[in-house]
Image (cartoon, rainbow, N blue to C red):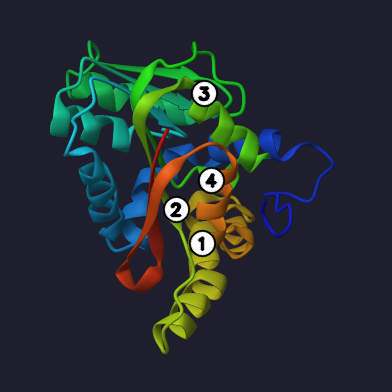
């Protein structure tokens, strides 16, 4: 489990409700801020994560915490699967995603639905692969979410998780910490009009069980053949596991 429970807002409501509210608020600014604050590197990270499915292209894919459907669209272009389901807890993010899907004429392949990652509305053994980009950090109950994904994944199917991590190498560690803690929240606050969203990003990354700790949780929740691939000096990591 995470070191501590980090919520977007200082309120008594559940983390799940707060995360949904936060993403609904920042949805109109989300894609722009992703590109701007990461200098566009986030698109490269997503492509590297999707490439982990290249050895056995999936026919039916679930993209959990799909947001505005960047990963779902990239999956559709890369592998031309029969069906992609993108699931997210934020209705406003999904609305933007549907507009993007329609513009790219992917309506017949990609379906975006509102739902809870810890209570997936699918039968056991439904999907050939499951992807999650920058989403597991926001789960209220990380192990429950991972077990749910394991349940709906077919035997031999692959889980690919892309998530922020913490650089360890000097001076990149210090530069990253300063940027994430001091610069990024200010830019996010001014641009998205949400004073907490990008402070929460920093706090949730600090609390997330990264690296070997996350691999151990994958083992505990029923996955095997897992490994971690650090990217860009450890700013984020790709975790690959099988059912």
Q: Pointers 1 and 2 in contact (CB under 8 A)?
A: no
Q: Residues within 10 Å of mark 4 (few under 14, many from 20)?
A: some
Q: Is residue 181 visible?
A: yes
Which residue is the site of mark 3? 151
> Between marks 3 and 2, how big is the CA–CA gap?
21 Å
- When the figure is inspected, residue 94 is found, relative to residue 121, above or below; the finding is below
Which residue is the site of mark 4? 219
Work out which residue is located at the far bottom of the displayed protein and give it.
Answer: 171
> Between marks 1 and 2, how big is the CA–CA gap?
13 Å
Mark 4 or mark 1, which is nearer the start of the sequence? 1
At 67% from the left and 35% from the top, the residue drawn is 16
Is 13 on the left or on the right of 120, as rendered?
Answer: right
Name the secondary structure under disc 2.
Answer: strand
- Nearer to us of marks 1 and 4 is 4
- When the figure is inspected, residue 142 is found, relative to residue 85, above or below; the finding is below
Which residue is the site of mark 1? 212
Q: Pointers 3 and 4 in contact (CB under 8 A)?
A: no
Is the C terminus in the top left, top right, bottom left or bottom right quadrant? Answer: top left
Is 175 on the left or on the right of 69, as rendered?
Answer: right
Which residue is the site of mark 2? 163
Q: Residues within 10 Å of mark 3 (few under 14, many from 20)?
A: many
Q: Which is more toward the observer, 122 or 34? A: 122
Is 13 on the left or on the right of 28, as rendered?
Answer: right
Q: Which is more toward the observer, 213 or 89? A: 213
Mark 4 or mark 3, which is nearer the start of the sequence? 3
Counting from the top left corner in percent of width and height, residue 98 is at 34, 21
> Between marks 1 and 4, how big is the CA–CA gap?
10 Å
Name the secondary structure under disc 4.
Answer: helix
């Amino acid at each position: 489990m995470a070191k501590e429970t980090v919520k977007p807002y200082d309120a008594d409501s559940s983390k799940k409700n707060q995360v949904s509210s936060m993403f609904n608020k920042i949805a109109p600014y989300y894609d722009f801020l992703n590109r701007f604050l990461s200098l566009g590197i986030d698109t490269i990270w997503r492509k590297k994560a999707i490439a982990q499915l290249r050895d056995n292209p999936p026919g039916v894919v679930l993209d959990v915490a799909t947001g505005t459907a960047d990963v779902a669209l990239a999956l559709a272009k890369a592998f031309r699967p029969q069906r992609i389901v993108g699931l997210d807890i934020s209705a406003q993010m999904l609305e933007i995603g549907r507009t993007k899907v329609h513009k790219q004429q992917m309506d017949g392949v990609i379906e975006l639905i509102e739902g809870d990652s810890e209570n997936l509305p699918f039968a056991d053994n439904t999907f050939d692969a499951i992807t999650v980009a920058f989403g597991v950090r926001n789960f209220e109950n990380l192990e429950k979410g991972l077990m749910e994904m394991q349940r709906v994944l077919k035997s031999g199917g692959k889980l690919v998780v892309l998530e922020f991590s913490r650089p360890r190498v000097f001076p990149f560690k210090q530069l990253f910490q300063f940027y994430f803690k001091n610069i990024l929240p200010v830019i996010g606050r001014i641009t998205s009009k949400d004073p907490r969203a990008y402070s929460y990003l920093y706090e949730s990354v600090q609390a997330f069980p990264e690296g070997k700790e996350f691999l151990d949780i994958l083992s505990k929740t029923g996955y095997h053949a897992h490994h971690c691939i650090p990217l860009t000096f450890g700013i984020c990591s790709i975790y690959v596991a099988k059912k």
